[in-house]
Amino acid sequence: MIEVIYFDLGKVIVDFDYAVAAQQLLKVTPLPLPEVIEVLSDANLIFEYETGKLSSPDYRRTVSQRLQMDVSMERFQQLWGNMFLPQPLLSESLLMHLKQRYRLILLSNTNEIHFEYVVNRYPILQHIQERVLSYQVGCMKPDPRIFELAIQRAGVPPEKIFFTDDRSENIEAARQSGIQAAQFHSEGSLIRDMEQVGISVNSH
């Protein structure tokens, strides 16, 4: 019997596109688009920032130096936050229905600037008050440690937890820790996967 549902954030609840942020950043950097995208998607830099090893001011300083730009933190957050697309991928009605019966928790690889940006712009997130965020806990999916922390936070055996994420490696890692997990493709497929494990989902 599922008691706790964990949701990934990006590409599950909210959608994003690095290219949109890169286009915005072209207004303030002399570098060409491919170099801007390269900086934004630098895996080492993302890891350092999203596991809390790098502070927001340090991250902004590093990116600003590499992009040869000089903007305030507020402007930087706005430019970089533009990668999040306006329309959520899940309906508010689904989350409202689920939260009446289950504890809903976010389990996300994210960073301080992005998380503050999305919380302020997506009212749908108010339906998920609990969070396990990589930059706050110091590790990120698919590291087994973040799933151990998620199980501790849930306070129930892993088989009573359901998790959805868009990345197959994260689903596999969750299953390795005993959590019931399904890869996210669309709201429709998620509802089918939830019903298969006995989660009560009203049809929309």
Image (cartoon, rainbow, N blue to C red):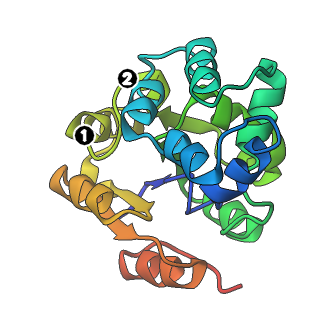
- The picture places residue 142, in percent across and down from the top left corner, at 28, 47
Decide: few, some or many residues near mark 1? Use Cα within 10 Å; few <14, some 14-19, many ≥20.
few
127 or 184: nearer the viewer:
184
Q: Is residue 183 left or right of residue 12?
A: left
Q: Quadrant of the C terminus?
A: bottom right
Looking at the rendered structure, the secondary structure element under dot 1 is loop
> Is any atom of residue 108 visible in this view?
yes
Left or right: 184 with respect to 116? left
How far apart are the two marked residues, 2 and 1, measured between alpha carbons?
Answer: 10 Å
The percent position of residue 56, horizontal first and vertical second, equals 60, 18
Q: Earlier in the sequence, mark 2 or mark 1?
A: 2
| Kind of residue indicated by mark 1 | Asp
Please give left or right for residue 101 compared with residue 150 in the image. Answer: right
Q: Residue at x 80, y 22 (%)?
A: 71
Q: Is residue 174 left or right of residue 140?
A: left
Type of residue at label 2? Gly
Q: Vertical placement of 89 versus 65: above or below?
A: below
Percent position of residue 136, x then y: 48, 23
The residue beneath circle 2 is: 138
Q: Residue at x 71, y 40 (%)?
A: 80
Residue at numbered disc 1: 143
Task: Find residue 69 and report its image quarter.
Answer: top right
Residue 158 is marked as none
Residue drawn 24% across the image and 33% down it: 145
Label 2 Cα crowd, 10 Å radius (few <14 / some 14-19 / many 20+): some
> Where is the N terminus found, in terms of image quarters?
bottom left
Up-down relation of residue 71 to residue 14 (above or below): above
The image position of residue 175, as x and y in percent, is 22, 59
Tell which of 25 and 16 is nearer to you.
25
